[in-house]
């Protein structure tokens, strides 16, 4: 399911359903709404059925007409319109449009509006938990030959993304890491020691939960690759699974996909070490135990 100019098709449909709900909640018919915003009624219908895309500016116009004032809900719906790929967005990541592909901008937009992120990582530390030196080493390895200036920009983006962990309210992050993540010497021993120290520190935050799947567990359902499940405030059926690849991202938004990945994540959490046990393991590897 590839992204389009206005976001993946399933998310576009879900956004349309939410806009329809808000219109009905305001006591308006589609004809009333069309008159208020100066559009044809057919455009309202196409947006609400997901048959056509909608820009962030269009969403804002509709929300004004429906009397929706709650800032977080407005920001979420505008972001989910696919505004990350349009020209009118105001997110900080738009300053890096020349460096970031549309899929990555869309990913950051979702992350910035989510209330919870559940992530499985099988090879590297999740981006939200990386130190600058570790992020630089990962970027250089993944995008070999990239000019130094672009590497610097991508590292800046990675670190800027971490502000969601310090917002009000902060993003709740639940991370399950394969033990290989902790033992792979990315950037060398010094970089890894600092990175493992950072994991222990962040794991002490009340809204960050880090668990390790030890080698002794053997095979597990998540071996197929890393993924992130984003959940959003107020609108639970807009949750999305993102499969991150080297040069692109794949969004899974069908209910059966969401249920399967959520069930898999719960299973991995149940079989992983507890956060306390995980912290002790991370500290032991850091100290060479």
Image (tube, grey):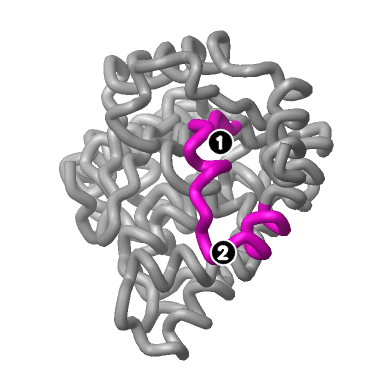
The residue identified by callout 1 is 117
Q: Is residue 170 visible?
A: no
Residue 72, how many percent across, how many down? 65, 46
Q: Nearer the viewer, residue 98 or 52?
A: 98
Quadrant of the image containing the N terminus: top left
- Quadrant location of the C terminus? top right
Q: Nearer the viewer, mark 2 or mark 1?
A: 2
Give the residues drawn in magenta, as a range.
175-195
Q: Position of residue 68 (x, y in %)?
A: 60, 43
Q: Is residue 281 left or right of residue 54?
A: right
Q: Residue at x 29, y 51 (%)?
A: 245
In the displayed structure, 168 sits above or below 22; it is: below
Q: Which mark is residue 188?
A: 2
Instruction: Give the x, y percent position of residue 263.
Output: 42, 12
- Element carrying mark 2: loop
Tell me the distance, in whole angstroms, between the alpha carbons under discs 2 and 1: 29 Å
Taking the spot 18% from the left edge, 48% from the top edge, the residue there is: 2
Element class at badge 1:
strand
Q: Residue furthest front?
A: 289
Between 197 and 209, the one nearer to me in the picture: 197
In the displayed structure, 90 sits above or below 215; it is below
Q: Which residue occupies the foreground of this view, 149 or 65?
A: 149
Relative side of 65 to 115, left or right: left
When asked about the image quadrant of residue 212, the answer is top right
Along the horizontal axis of the image, is 269 left or right of 123? Answer: right
Q: 78 left or right of 198?
A: left
> Residue 96: within the magenta?
no
Crowding at dot 2, Cα within 10 Å, few <14 / some 14-19 / many 20+, comes out as: few
Residue 249 point in image, percent of width and height: 29, 50
Q: Quadrant of residue 92?
A: bottom right
């Amino acid at each position: 399911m590839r992204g389009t100019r206005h976001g993946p098709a399933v998310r576009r449909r879900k956004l349309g359903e939410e806009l329809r709900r808000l219109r009905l909640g305001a006591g308006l018919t589609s004809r009333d709404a069309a008159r208020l915003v100066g559009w044809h009624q057919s455009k309202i219908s196409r947006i609400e059925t997901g048959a056509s895309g909608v820009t962030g500016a269009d969403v804002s116009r509709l929300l004004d007409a429906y009397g929706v004032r709650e800032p977080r809900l407005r920001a979420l719906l505008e972001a989910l319109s696919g505004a990350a790929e349009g020209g009118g967005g105001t997110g900080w990541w738009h300053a890096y449009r020349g460096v970031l592909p549309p899929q990555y901008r869309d990913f950051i937009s979702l992350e910035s509006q989510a209330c919870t992120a559940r992530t499985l990582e099988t090879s590297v530390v999740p981006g939200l938990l990386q130190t600058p030196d570790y992020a630089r080493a990962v970027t250089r390895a993944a995008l070999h030959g990239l000019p130094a200036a672009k590497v610097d920009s991508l590292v800046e983006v990675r670190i800027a993304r971490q502000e969601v962990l310090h917002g009000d309210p902060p993003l709740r992050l639940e991370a399950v890491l394969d033990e290989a993540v902790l033992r792979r010497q990315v950037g060398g021993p010094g970089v890894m020691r600092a990175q493992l120290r950072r994991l222990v520190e962040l794991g002490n935050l009340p809204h960050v939960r880090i668990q390790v799947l030890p080698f002794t567990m053997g095979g597990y359902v998540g071996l197929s690759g890393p993924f992130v499940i984003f959940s959003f405030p107020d609108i639970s059926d807009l949750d999305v699974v993102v499969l991150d690849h080297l040069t692109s991202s794949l969004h899974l938004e069908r209910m059966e996909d969401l249920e399967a990945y959520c069930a898999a994540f719960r299973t991995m959490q149940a079989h992983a070490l507890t956060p306390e046990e995980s912290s002790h393991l991370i500290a032991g590897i850091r100290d060479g135990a």
